[in-house]
Image: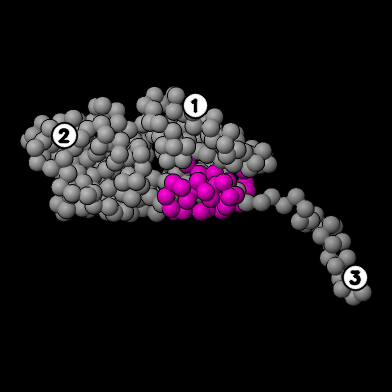
Amino acid sequence: MAGTKTVACIAAFLGLCGCSTRGTNPPIRVGSKNFTEQVVLGEIIAQHLEHRLHRTVERSLNLGGTLLAHQALLSGQIDLYPEYTGTALAAVLKDPIETDPGAVLARVKSEYLRRFHLEWLDPLGIDDTFAMVINGPQARARHLDTLTDAAKVPEPWTLGVGYEFEQRADGLAALEKMYHLRWTGAPKTMDLGLLYKAMEQGQVTMIAANSTDGLLSKMDLRVLRDDLRAFPPYQVGIVARQEAMRQTPGLREALLELSAKFSNQQMQNLNLQVDAQHRPVSEVAAEFLKQSGLN
């Protein structure tokens, strides 16, 4: 009986002070994959939601690769994260590679909703395609501007790649199918953050980087143009659980405020601040939101 009285008293007290746990808003859970751009975008999204919705936001940044992040979304461990249309098309949906940005976005939007009950919001303004990168002086000396030019070089290339590029249909397989480049052997696979160091040290002569990498603007390198369009578009958009969008007032509107607020050049600069200038991600994100008039 004493226990019953105690529970009743606590319940009455909570009711009087308006502290009832019913209706307590669950946190919004923001995720990201495990490289600089994803972590920066995840932090920007998280801070923006905190400012706009005045809700607790839990961060699950640096989750891992595409399939780990996608599975975390499907299982409800996270509510949303930034993703790339070409990655969704090839790695998740496993559809044939398509090069028209509008067609890829439409396909991804409809199939994610139909298969997974996940919503794609309007793109952020970034198209972060794979970038095949070589040494700048070598490119100038041999007049190499495109991947077709690189395929004509008689000496084989030593390729450095991230783990996903080697395995994905829109990565190494697409590159080799279109260009038939000569290699010294199997690609040297490493963390994305080590690719530029490997290039600088001469361990590799070509790397599979990303077009918004900050170090592209800092080092003397040449991005070879994908003149035969081996790679699909990689527009960045926020993917969210449909249930979370329905149950969280204002979430859709807040996320849509980030649409078209970025450019490739801005994203490259944000990445550079973290990778080369070693600024904390939280500071870089807060400064971007302030400059964009979003906080």
User: What crowding class fits label 2: few (fewer than 14 Cα within 10 Å), some (14-19), or many (20 or more)?
Assistant: some
Q: Nearer the viewer, residue 294 or 233?
A: 233
User: Of discs 1 and 2, which sits in the foreground?
Assistant: 2
Please determine whether, in this image, residue 98 is positioned above or below residue 285.
above
Disc 3: which residue:
5
Most foreground residue, 26 or 153: 153
Alpha-carbon span between mark 3 and mark 1: 59 Å
- Which badge, 1 or 2, comes first in the chain's sequence? 1
| Amino acid type shown at disc 3 | Lys
**Quick check: is 55 in the magenta stretch?**
yes
**Outermost residue toward the right in this view:** 1
- Give the mark nearest the N terminus, 3 or 2: 3
Q: CA distance from mark 3 to mark 2?
A: 81 Å
The stretch of residues the image draws in magenta is: 53-82
Indicate the position of residue 210 as horizontal and vertical percent values: 31, 41
The residue located at (40%, 31%) in the rendering is 96
Residue 24 point in image, percent of width and height: 72, 52
Q: Where is 238 relative to 99, above or below?
A: below
Residue position for label 1: 106
At label 1, which amino acid type do we have? Ala
* Residue at image location 90% in from the left, 70% down from the top: 5
Q: Which mark is residue 151?
A: 2
Q: Quadrant of residue 52?
A: top right
